[in-house]
């Protein structure tokens, strides 16, 4: 399901986000000299601007990805709070409920930047919890809104909007409505989020909460598995910086993704992009694995930007299309590589389908066969005769296309997950190596005529014959061209 249809479906999603909003201020300029008053550089200011930060940056990303967003947060009764309110009003698809806490200042982070290099950051913040009256107001707003959304994000920046008791009230309410709960956590105690669907800590945050090292993949997985068990989470996705992401599920599923970042200018706010992309992907119908794929892609885009930036829906779609072109070539693999991939897929409970052929001049009959084959399982492996194999079967004038060309065309089809070439006259040895769950051939064969059928059936596999499109064959196309 890793295709543009999922990204396009982002626009029909509705997300309820609750969290600590901040104001991110940026003051840019250049430095030409040192102050005569003290040994500090003088920043000559050229530009000043403010954007939503903290949970507000999650909202910015959700809106940029196309989601309809309801946002609940708290601000102080000050100019910074008024500016946050103004910034939120500028979004057409965002409805904000901002609880004014007269006892606190609005959290504001000011970054001073010279020639793209941050030279100083100042923070204005107060981190005590909301009083009981304001917390009750927040919970009431949440209860009024949760039923109308696809899922919930709790963006915890440890600035006081979430007390342990308040968190549990929100989580229980969301669960009562059957809504998934995604949490970007903070602090030492993840039992605060008990019962949440998915947590998205980075590696350092996870180590801090678990009081255990998380440097290796194995350590990350072990710590996450223990945390999931202790806190009754469904899954955790751990961001590991330049090493990518790791998905650990309560069901036992484990997946690692390498980072897609080609250039890294600024990682600030990348976690907000990740949880926003996960949310809209899941709301659009993607699996956890597919949602992590999109989130990893979005993170690779956003860290190449400066400041607390966002990723737009069209950026993600363009990047996906570029990657799909590269992935076509990556689908063409050796026998050993195919074995490794199949082992991982089977560990996730996926059903492996195999079919084979020469596929010289791809025609509608081929496409129909491959589509029907894919319907019988989760992953489709195509065994492709090499040029020498085709020549022995069909004569010295065939194939019409080189084996690499035939493999590339097959790999461009959405239904095909892997293309594996074989030199032999039949795919029997390849079938013995890959051990598919399903073996598919056209209905012009009988089961006893299908190469490898008895072998696949010997370990409980299935042999399926699918109807072919009448009148379609490469031989007929060639004869017509010659005529």
Image (cartoon, helix red, strand yellow):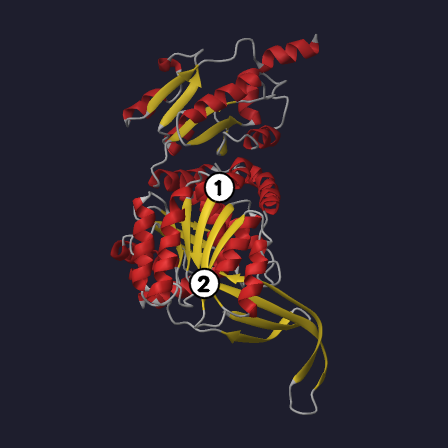
**Is the C terminus in the top left, top right, bottom left or bottom right quadrant?**
top right
Of 447 and 294, nearer the camera is 294
Does 273 sit above or below residue 284? below
Q: What residue is shown at x 45% (from left), y 21% (from top)?
A: 372
Label 2 sits on residue: 20
Q: Which residue is mark 1?
A: 13
Which of the numbered marks, if any, corresponds to residue 255?
Answer: none
Cα separation, mark 2 vs mark 1, equals 22 Å
Whole-percent x and y of residue 210?
Answer: 31, 65
Give the mark nearer the N terminus: 2 vs 1: 1
Mark 1 neighbour class, 10 Å CA radius: few under 14, some 14 to 19, many 20 or more: many
308 vs 174, left or right, is right
Please state if 447 lies on the left or on the right of 400 as rendered: left
Q: Secondary structure at mark 1?
A: loop
Number of numbered callouts drawn? 2
What residue appears at the point 45 percent right and 13 percent down from the top-left corner? Answer: 467
Q: Position of residue 348 (x, y in %)?
A: 35, 40
Disc 2 crowd, CA 10 A, few/some/many (<14, 14-19, 20+): many
Can you say whether 243 is above or below 41 in the image? above
x then y, percent, for residue 163: 34, 64
Q: Is residue 284 visible?
A: yes
- Residue 236 seen in this snapshot: no
Left/right of residue 160 with respect to residue 308 in the rendered view: left
Please name the residue shown 38% across and 63% down the image: 134
Residue shown at the point (28%, 28%) measured from the top left? 459
Instruction: Name, please, the residue furthest toward the bottom.
Output: 37
């Amino acid at each position: 399901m890793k295709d543009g249809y999922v990204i396009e479906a982002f626009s029909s999603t509705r997300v309820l986000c609750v969290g600590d909003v901040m104001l991110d201020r940026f003051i840019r300029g250049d430095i030409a000299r040192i102050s005569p008053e003290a040994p500090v550089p003088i920043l000559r200011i050229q530009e000043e601007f403010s954007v939503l930060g903290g949970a507000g940056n999650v909202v910015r990303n959700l809106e940029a990805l196309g989601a309809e967003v309801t946002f609940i947060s708290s601000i102080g009764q000050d100019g910074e709070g008024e500016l946050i309110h103004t910034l939120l009003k500028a979004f057409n698809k965002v409805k904000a409920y901002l609880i004014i806490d007269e006892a606190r200042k609005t959290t504001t982070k000011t970054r001073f930047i010279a020639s793209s290099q941050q030279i100083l950051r100042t923070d204005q913040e107060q981190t005590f919890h909301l009083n009981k009256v304001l917390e009750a107001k927040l919970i009431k707003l949440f209860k009024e809104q949760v039923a109308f959304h696809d899922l919930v994000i709790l963006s915890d920046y440890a600035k006081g909007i979430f007390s342990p008791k308040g968190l549990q009230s929100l989580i229980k309410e969301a669960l009562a409505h059957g809504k998934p709960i995604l949490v970007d956590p903070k602090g030492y105690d993840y039992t605060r989020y008990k019962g949440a669907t998915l947590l998205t800590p980075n590696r350092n945050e996870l180590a801090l909460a678990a009081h255990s090292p998380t440097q290796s993949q194995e350590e990350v997985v072990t710590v996450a598995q223990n945390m999931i068990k202790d806190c009754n989470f469904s899954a955790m996705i751990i961001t590991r910086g330049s090493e990518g992401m790791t998905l650990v599920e309560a069901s036992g599923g484990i997946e690692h993704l390498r980072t897609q970042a080609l250039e890294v200018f600024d990682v600030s706010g990348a976690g907000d992009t990740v949880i926003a992309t996960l949310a809209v992907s899941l709301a659009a119908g993607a699996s956890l694995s597919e949602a992590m794929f999109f989130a990893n892609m979005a993170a690779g885009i956003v860290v190449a930007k400066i400041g607390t930036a966002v990723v737009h829906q069209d950026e993600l779609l363009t990047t996906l299309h570029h990657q799909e072109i590269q992935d076509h070539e990556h689908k063409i693999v050796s026998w050993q590589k195919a074995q490794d991939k199949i082992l991982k897929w089977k560990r996730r409970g996926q059903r492996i389908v195999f079919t084979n052929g020469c596929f010289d001049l791809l025609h509608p009959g081929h496409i129909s066969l491959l589509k029907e084959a894919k319907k019988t399982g989760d992953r489709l492996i195509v065994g492709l005769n090499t040029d020498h194999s085709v020549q022995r079967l069909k004569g010295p004038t065939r194939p019409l296309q080189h084996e690499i060309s035939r493999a590339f065309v097959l790999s461009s089809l959405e239904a095909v997950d892997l293309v594996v070439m074989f030199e032999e006259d039949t795919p029997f040895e390849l079938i013995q190596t890959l051990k598919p769950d399903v073996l598919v051939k056209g209905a012009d064969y009988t089961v006893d005529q299908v190469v490898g059928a008895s072998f696949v059936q010997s370990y409980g596999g299935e042999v399926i014959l699918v109807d072919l499109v009448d009148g379609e064959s490469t031989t007929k196309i060639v004869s017509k061209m010659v005529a």
